[in-house]
Each structure stands twice: as structure tokens, then as C-alpha cells.
Image (cartoon, helix red, strand yellow):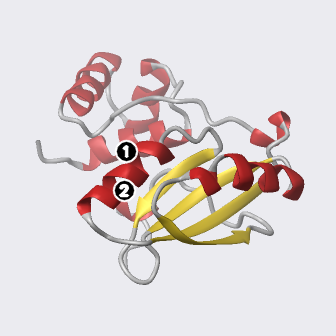
Amino acid sequence: MALDRKDLAILAELTTNARASHTELANKVGLSSTALARRQKALEDDGYIQAYQAALDLAQFGLTTTVLVRIALESQSDDALKAFEAEVVKCPSVVRCFLMSGTDDYILIVLARDIQDFERIHRTELSRLPRVARVQSSFALREVVNRAVPTVVFGEGKR
């Protein structure tokens, strides 16, 4: 399915308010509610929309410390990668994990209450991961940008 301006407008609106009604969305993008509902369903069916979720204020849950953890494995063999990945998904404090190119094999995003809580996470979760040779952690001081989708997807900010 090729996306047109209306589809992109629907997607842009949903990234800022996934709870918008069909009527609200239709008014914003200039479609009837029926046409909007049909297009939104097609975007879901074609996989452009994978899920709807609430963005939580994690500070309300006491999670005020974001830690970027760089991990190097002792080996980059298929067995080592599979073993690490099978266990890292079980770590409750890890919210994102990326297999990387370059000097680090993985970068993890970990949420903690504070530095003491991260020490606990390091001791009880991260240090138990298999085949790890090196762990380096950096603490985020402040979040500057947090977008679910880069605006260039919707035709904004093109150079």
C-alpha cells in the first residue's frame, strides 16, 4: 500500500493522540468518519500501525534515572549472541536492547529509581547475563528529545 498525504496525516495525528476518536481524526485530516475508519483499518492491516499504547510518566512510578549500558561480549559467536539475548529479555529493568555494530555488542536502556537502585540492578540483573566481557554505564542527565517517530516520516523536517 502506498501512503498518501491523508494516510501520513492520520499517522501523524495518532502518534500524538492514539485515543483520538474517528470523528476527531476525520476533522483534523479532512475526511469523513467512515473514510477515516477505513483508512485507519487499512494502515493497521498493512502493518503501518503495529499497536496502540499509553505513554506513562515513569517519574510517577519513581523511575527517574535512565542509564545507557554498553555491553561487550567475550565472543560474537551465534551461541554467545543467542545466550545473551535469551537472558536480557528476562531483565525487568531493561526497557530497550539493541544489537550494535562497532566496539560494543549491545546497548541497553535501563530505568532505575536512583543510583543505588541501579547498583542493585547491576548486581542482580546485568552482572548475571551470560558471556559478558565488559559493562560500561552512562547516566542520562536530562532527556532532550523523546519522539516515538521521527517527524521526517510525515514529510516534516526534510532537508
Residue 25 is situated, as x and y percent measured from the top left of the image, at 44, 29
Q: Quadrant of the N terminus?
A: top left
Residue in view at x 65 percent, y 44 percent: 93
Q: Which amino acid does label 1 sit on?
A: Ala
The mark that comes first in sequence, 1 or 2, is 1
* Secondary structure state at the residue bearing disc 1: helix
- Which of the two residues, 132 or 5, is positioned nearer the viewer here? 132
Q: What residue type is labelled 2?
A: Phe
- Which of the two residues, 129 or 8, is positioned nearer the viewer here? 129
**Residue at which label 1 appears:** 9
Instruction: Kindly indicate the quadrant of the structure image that contains residue 142.
Output: bottom right
* Secondary structure state at the residue bearing disc 2: helix
Residue 44 is situated, as x and y percent measured from the top left of the image, at 27, 29
Q: In this view, does 91 lie to the left or right of 79?
A: right
**Residue at which label 2 appears:** 154
Q: Is residue 84 left or right of residue 115?
A: left
- Which of the two residues, 42 or 7, is positioned nearer the viewer here? 42
Q: Determine which of the numbered discs, if any, sits on residue 108 in the image.
A: none
Does residue 131 sit above or below 44 in this rendering? Answer: below
Residue in view at x 70 percent, y 46 percent: 124
